[in-house]
Image (cartoon, coloured by chain):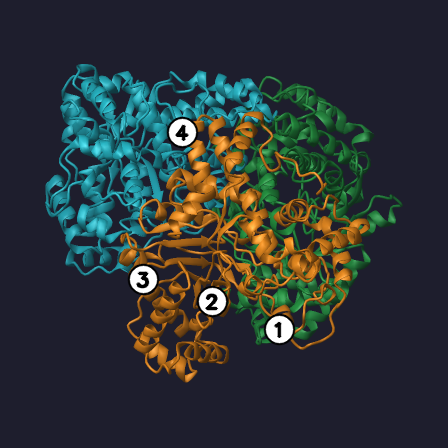
Chain colours: A orange, B cyan, C green
Amino acid sequence: MDAGHLNPDRFFDPEPETRRAARLLYEETRALPIVSPHGHVDPSLLARNDPFPEPTALIIQPDHYVLRLLYAHGVSLESLGVPRKDGGAVESDPRAVWRLFASRYYLFQGTPSAAWLEYELSEVFGVHETLLAATADRVYDQIAEKLRSPEFRPRALFERFNIEVLATTDGAADTLEHHAAIGASGWKGRVIPTFRPDALLRIASPESWRAEFDAFERVHGSQITTFAGFLDAIRERRERFRAAGAVATDHGVIEPLAERASDAAFLFGRALAGTATPDDERRFHAHMLMKMADMSVQDGLVMQLHAGALRDHNQTVFETFGRDRGGDIPVATEFTRNLHELLNAYGNDSRFTLVAFTLDESTYSRELAPLAGHYPALRLGAPWWFHDSIAGMTRFRERTTETAGIYKTAGFTDDTRAFCSIPARHDLSRRMDANYLGGLVARHIIGMDDARVMAHALAYDLAKQTYHL
Amino acid sequence: MDAGHLNPDRFFDPEPETRRAARLLYEETRALPIVSPHGHVDPSLLARNDPFPEPTALIIQPDHYVLRLLYAHGVSLESLGVPRKDGGAVESDPRAVWRLFASRYYLFQGTPSAAWLEYELSEVFGVHETLLAATADRVYDQIAEKLRSPEFRPRALFERFNIEVLATTDGAADTLEHHAAIGASGWKGRVIPTFRPDALLRIASPESWRAEFDAFERVHGSQITTFAGFLDAIRERRERFRAAGAVATDHGVIEPLAERASDAAFLFGRALAGTATPDDERRFHAHMLMKMADMSVQDGLVMQLHAGALRDHNQTVFETFGRDRGGDIPVATEFTRNLHELLNAYGNDSRFTLVAFTLDESTYSRELAPLAGHYPALRLGAPWWFHDSIAGMTRFRERTTETAGIYKTAGFTDDTRAFCSIPARHDLSRRMDANYLGGLVARHIIGMDDARVMAHALAYDLAKQTYHL
Amino acid sequence: MDAGHLNPDRFFDPEPETRRAARLLYEETRALPIVSPHGHVDPSLLARNDPFPEPTALIIQPDHYVLRLLYAHGVSLESLGVPRKDGGAVESDPRAVWRLFASRYYLFQGTPSAAWLEYELSEVFGVHETLLAATADRVYDQIAEKLRSPEFRPRALFERFNIEVLATTDGAADTLEHHAAIGASGWKGRVIPTFRPDALLRIASPESWRAEFDAFERVHGSQITTFAGFLDAIRERRERFRAAGAVATDHGVIEPLAERASDAAFLFGRALAGTATPDDERRFHAHMLMKMADMSVQDGLVMQLHAGALRDHNQTVFETFGRDRGGDIPVATEFTRNLHELLNAYGNDSRFTLVAFTLDESTYSRELAPLAGHYPALRLGAPWWFHDSIAGMTRFRERTTETAGIYKTAGFTDDTRAFCSIPARHDLSRRMDANYLGGLVARHIIGMDDARVMAHALAYDLAKQTYHL
């Protein structure tokens, strides 16, 4: 694939009527500002606005999509320069890592990682060469040179990417200092935090929970000894996040169980005592999701639910290199029964918005679209992670639109920690939505005028509406 | 979308070879009579043959597909004139409801509801305007005027729709008086009942079960005190249904478990005593499915199984407005093990036909097509409910044909309670089957001559064969 | 469908850009040798090299795909000449069976069985007539005549099919005499065994287990009294298989649970005593999968896992006719948790290769592609059984490539016991992969040069690499 000449019709169906409609619809959305209500960019990047160090640290090492597929082909994480927790030796020459990646780049053919990277090379860095072993050094040098120029500082790119708003994801104990620094800097970029209290709810891992809880107490400013006090402290933190611009919370769960536990205070006591079991955690977490929904009704923060990832499946990789190295694997997920109590309690409330994301595509048409096609509070999150892809986005629209329409979906969320992939991901999403709508036009299911409005909604309006941005 | 000019190629793939074949195949089936072996039209409509009151009561209020998506966008059911169980105030001006619907009609773009409505407006009512806030009154008036003419009485429409046979769905305690009235009226339209004993089997809801059981005893004509007597009474009712023209039974279940319970008589005793638990009900229901299959072997009624809907998920909506308001949500469904005992007992019997419907599309290729591709008695029901849609019907064919062929599917069932949507739904189904077969022709998987026979079978023959019509 | 004129573009998308690319890509692979690392051809066929008896015994009776769909339409297995276990009367005239098949051949339209058969008729037997009741005898006679010629002996066909290597599947107690005979015959065809110890692990069926165990002891050459001895005997048998050319083991399981059992020796004792329960078997089997993986690390045999078939669902058919008559039905399958222990123990080991096959397509994108896109040892097996089909292969690529790429898939396995279908199945697979890649080219996702390499890999290289052939 020739990164130098991105085809203007790329990713569209080749059938001429569909392609023509898709192209027109994409053109309507191509230049719209980027609204990014959920992602994992490090806010210190934009607070400090330091130059990016060099291509490998920017493009390879933070991208668990890249790491995992290289690892799957026998490339050690050490050889990719991923730091070991024990401080053991890893490749320290970024150029060597880059060369290794270039030589294995063919493994990514047909994956969204290739589509994103090719956009980045061509559109972000103006590199008009295909990445191969033979071109690795030249491509590296071109990017490295760009990174030294002021136009490639994070804030300059933020502006060039036309980002209207960028949400980060932040632990409950986060000091929000980087968001404050951005605010105080006078720079006008809108970078907002998202309240993600997951670590505070993993009570069955006493050591890491205690560390998180201590940090939470510190940032809260006083000791927390009761469950009521814990809830109050969470309310206070949510308020701080809101004051810093937050519009949403985020919750990562294996199963999306939401259910009141009459003994929640007792379970919290076991957490404090370091004696909570996995079953305690499960019930405590289910109870806390109900509480979070309740708080969202009160404070207006949109509740995001990312369900179905079994984290750190590969214990060796986790123990050696830590989290987010590509070893998280989905499991079958149930929403109809798990969300029953939550939706009955809050799903009819116009003050509440729940955005549900899944890694189990069989739930699109079976559970999520029917639920979102009924409960006012529920919106369908964009196809997530493994499914944030050309065919994955197509499946999402094909399996949800007929039951829930497009107007109960929440717009696109890039969900990335790779800053330079943001425009690539939004561009891909706009293309695939234009292509989906173009297919409806070509089959006379919708008219072109309606399709134009729908394309605009999918690329921009729905994210703003859903997240009150 | 312009309701005024339905495109003759609508819903077909735009690729020319496929479209050409699809168009030819559709033309072969377009004018065939409608065979409707499963649906929810109220038989009193055709017994009384009164004019339909006005457009809103005809098109919006009985259609839970329409109600649920409007509700999902924050439109209250009160504002749509849906009666409250407590008699509380709801919108009483049908024109106001119609305007509200028209103003939100864009929410249905890309859903089958839009496809059906546009067919109804154009082909049934001759309304050649797009439904919008600005056209709402004019469209309303045009339909209302039509409804006052004799050509728009239910029986006249039945004949114009070219309905050869229409099955209704009727509780075990139904008196079948409307079917009798139709028979006695001299009108030749064939409207047949279907025996659906679900309410009689929900023994863990003592109050509603007792009410149903009392009605069943009344219609049966004598008291039922033993399980054997209960089974005899069911046999007798099935016979009455058969005498009234019934060809099938229908069973709505969350999980399709069929399994003999050695203590069934005891469970029936608990039902009579009002002490049956949910687990009792589960086992009793599983036992009764075995009994129903056994009775079908004897009396020849086709057994329909609709599995996987969790009814009344939204308790507030249920308590305020009752059933069938759009709050039923699918769950994952298992057939291979659940139907094991039933298929082993009756699945090899040529006297028996079981038609299975699912809301869990993952079962199409995994369980249902392999089962139907082996057991003589099993047929695959048409894509149901949320999946009775353009993409849904395509997925059904793509995932079942390669394993079960088309000749183990049961033809189309419109499953509707909205009388005027019947021709719209059959037309859509015929189009999608033609399109699927056209795709096989274009890919040289089948020849055009065979495709013609197959299109005819899917549109007409298979329903007649399956249901012995 | 006209078997006489196989369309050169058959099975390709009709859209011209895709079709053009698919055709070019297919042409690159059409003439490549067949590598068949997994299947069920009887090795005695090639050891004896006797002529095939006649068309029915060759084409109909060994093909459970054909038997099951005829049976599903009420054709008795007796009338198809399938031998009864009780020796009861069955149709003994192969021509009568052939005629029956021909008269029902339309039932297979749109299924891969039709695609395979039409290839066999046209390309293997040079029969240029459509199979119908009216042509049945002529077609039969043409094939029968061919079968009498030396060019249609098994080894001649093997060579004409351009089979580079053919793996059979053989029980742990197999003497491998036919493989030895082939080796000793001087014929150069490479026919290798595969070690499949399933029957040795079904300890909860005491009688059949004891028979298998006795045979295993005989072939091992000494009595086995301890679990350690059992493991040693298995190691020894694997070594014998390796010496006979084996490159792989194969394991058929309902659920792919792999988990060490601390009481495995005790469970083996219960097997010896004939007292093992189904739960004992489940845990014993899970333990043995761990042991098999461990042995694979040592001896290099690739481990194949075929998960999710509930065997012999139809007890009547099983009791009357035995196994493999079309009555096996898939169940929902879980890999993420079931393979957790195995992948953690061996999944990072470069000496180990696990090839996983599923009958539950919902696991492609949810579990299998993410697992294979991370663990170096895991490869995705080709779409299996019901999914070894035109649409099934397309779904497999669409749902796995974006997460795992194509280079973590294991190439095509025909998995057939019908010898003459081998080239038909590989041809279909090469066409569908070419079509998939052609679609990526037409949508500018990959370039044509890369697609050529990928097509070659899918048709040939990946099978050789995966299985060390």
Give whichever of discs 2 and 1 has the lower sequence position: 2
At 55% from the left edge and 65% from the top edge, which residue is drawn? A44
Give x and y (percent) for residue B348.
44, 40
Residue type (three-letter) at the residue carrying disc 2: Ala
Toward the front, the furthest residue is: A186
CA separation in Å, label 3 and label 1: 39 Å
Residue C297 position (above or below residue B185) = below
CA separation in Å, label 1 and label 4: 56 Å
Chain bearing tag 2 is A
Chain bearing tag 4 is B
Is circle 3 on the same chain as circle 1? yes
Chain bearing tag 3 is A
Q: Do the residues labelled 4 and 2 touch (CB within 8 Å)?
A: no
Q: Mark 2 points at which residue?
A: A180
Q: Mark 3 points at which residue?
A: A299
Residue type (three-letter) at the residue carrying disc 4: Gly
Give whichever of discs 2 and 3 has the lower sequence position: 2
Q: Are marks 1 and 4 in contact (CB under 8 Å)?
A: no
Badge 2 marks a residue whose secondary structure is helix
Q: Residues within 10 Å of mark 1 (few under 14, many from 20)?
A: few
Q: Which mark is residue A319?
A: 1
Q: Residue B411 carries which label?
A: 4
Q: Which of B149 and C196 is in front in this view?
A: B149
Badge 1 marks a residue whose secondary structure is helix
Q: Is residue C235 visible?
A: yes
CA separation in Å, label 2 and label 1: 34 Å
Q: Can residue C307 be seen in this view?
A: no
At 39% from the left edge and 23% from the top edge, which residue is drawn? B460
